[in-house]
Image (cartoon, rainbow, N blue to C red):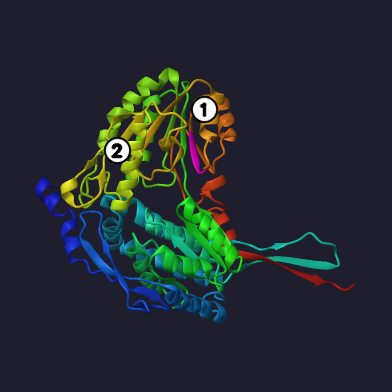
Amino acid sequence: MSAATSDSKKPDWHARAREITIDGRAWINGERVDAASGATFDKHSPVDGRRLAAVARGEAVDIDRAVAAGRAAFEDGRWSRKAPAARKRILQRWSELITAARDELALLETLDMGKPIQYALSVDVPATARTIAWYGEAIDKVYDEIAPTGSNALALITREAMGVIGCIVPWNYPMIMAAWKLGPALATGNSVVMKPSEKSPLTALKLAELAVQAGIPPGVFNVVPGYGHEAGEALALHMDVDAIGFTGSTRTGRRMLDYASRSNLKRVWNELGGKSAFLVFPDHHDPALAARTVAGAMYFNQGESCNAPSRVLVHASIADDFVAVLREEAPKYRPGDPLDASTVMGALVDDGQLRTVMGYIASGKAEGARCISGGEQVRTDSGGPYVEPTLFDGVTPQMKIAREEIFGPVLSVLRFESEAEAIALANGTDYGLQASVWSHDINRAHRVARALRAGTVHVNQYDEDDITVPFGGHRQSGNGRDKSLHALEKYTELKTTWLRIDR
């Protein structure tokens, strides 16, 4: 096949972007609806600033409508009382429809939050579909329990759906984060009201449309777009919402706990920020591989990942060579047009995030860190917010760039002299989401992994992942776990039914 013929079969994503029709209305009780007030907000694309759609600006009255629809669906049993095998078939069908809508969903994701189209296609859509299918497949294989009581009793321990679950999801992985909540919440028989980020609401609305096509009854899955202080707050404060699954900033996670205390003491499951440490010891056989791995993990998704390995802790004896490899790697992730299939780094989500990231870069320079690669805004003629992959050396633990979550493509290198110092540096943060240990000394690898206070510790790799393992953190990185069978615990109540047996 000639190059010209091959190129002619490649999708023209710019053309598709011009042709796509976007419906920004809310999804309540199985249909598209305007906000009760008729209010909307304009959603612009970080790719180039184009206006994508007018999106319904949901407020408390719209949340009330969605919660009422979810409660009615739960109480009449149209979903909650379906046999697990029946729910499984529908969730698997939904997963198939997500895969069939791959191109549309990927394009919406790229236009909405600026990630490269190649990764929206190869990562976000498949991960979303797999999550829904996996929880569907799992739910009819989860057994309840019988307690070991005396012979005069039978104590049954069952897991029951809670009712109406509020899900508030972020803008960095809109589909995947939605699926992590939807899979276990719906598989266990709950109804869901989802508030997507106002920065990236479009794929959640499309997922709801596909859910009804798959056979999920109206009212079971509702989506109300809007702002956090309006729709999000109303959902978290709602007296008829039984639990909140939240992914976002630690600052907003604190508010979720406050809203629960001010309302009905609903359960709050927070998946929050991170400042993950990447520890490289001199006994690792290939430090250059570690450097390439951390660059790829850090600059993926523009650095807009809660588990981004933003602190690289390198033994002083190998630090200079390690930094030299990083300096060569960073420019390979230079931002490009997200709608170009070859682009590996896209746009930040909006101008506000651009200002935040550039502020941290300025802070690093002012506090004495050496910016040895990147550090500038680029593609300014595109109309979108793009920042170079940035690398700082000479970072100390007291600097803001070493302490605070940046949520952008900024990597900091800190040097250590001993294993004890490396562990202290890694744990010297308010967060505890992920970490990585690079060592070929098996004793050190286990010893350090055990000492690190993080929900996931990678060894000689970073960010290898599967739906079968839990995701979450310690301390101010949140509570509870997304993914795996453990996520089912978040959206169910344990009930003991004690029967006396007469002799």
**Residue density around tag 1, few if under 14, some if 14–19, many if 20 or more, within 10 Å:** many
Residue stretch rendered in magenta on the structure = 432-436
Seen in the picture, residue 440 relative to 485 is either above or below; the reply is above
Identify residue for label 1. Answer: 422
Task: Give residue 224's quadrant in the image.
Answer: bottom left
Residue 280 visible to an observer of this rendering: yes
Q: Position of residue 456 (x, y in %)?
A: 52, 42
Q: Is residue 106 left or right of residue 243?
A: left
Q: As drawn, which residue projects farthest toward the front?
A: 366
User: Whole-Å distance between the Cαs marked 1 and 2?
Assistant: 25 Å
User: What main secondary structure does the magenta stretch of the protein show?
Assistant: strand
The amino acid at mark 2 is Pro
Residue flagged by tag 1: what amino acid is it? Answer: Ala
Residue 211 is inside the magenta segment = no
433 in magenta: yes
Whichever of callouts 1 and 2 sits on the residue coming sooner in the sequence is: 2
The residue shown at (41%, 72%) is 59
Specify whether residue 137 is in view: no
Categorize mark 2 by other alpha carbons within 10 Å: few (<14), some (14-19), many (20+). Answer: many
Where residue 52 appears, as percent x and y from the top left, is 24, 64
Q: In this view, does 356 lie to the left or right of 80?
A: left
Determine which of the numbered discs, if any, sits on residue 389 in the image.
2
Percent position (x, y) of residue 300? 34, 43
The tag on residue 205 is none
Residue at image coords 36%, 78%: 37
Q: Residue furthest top?
A: 317
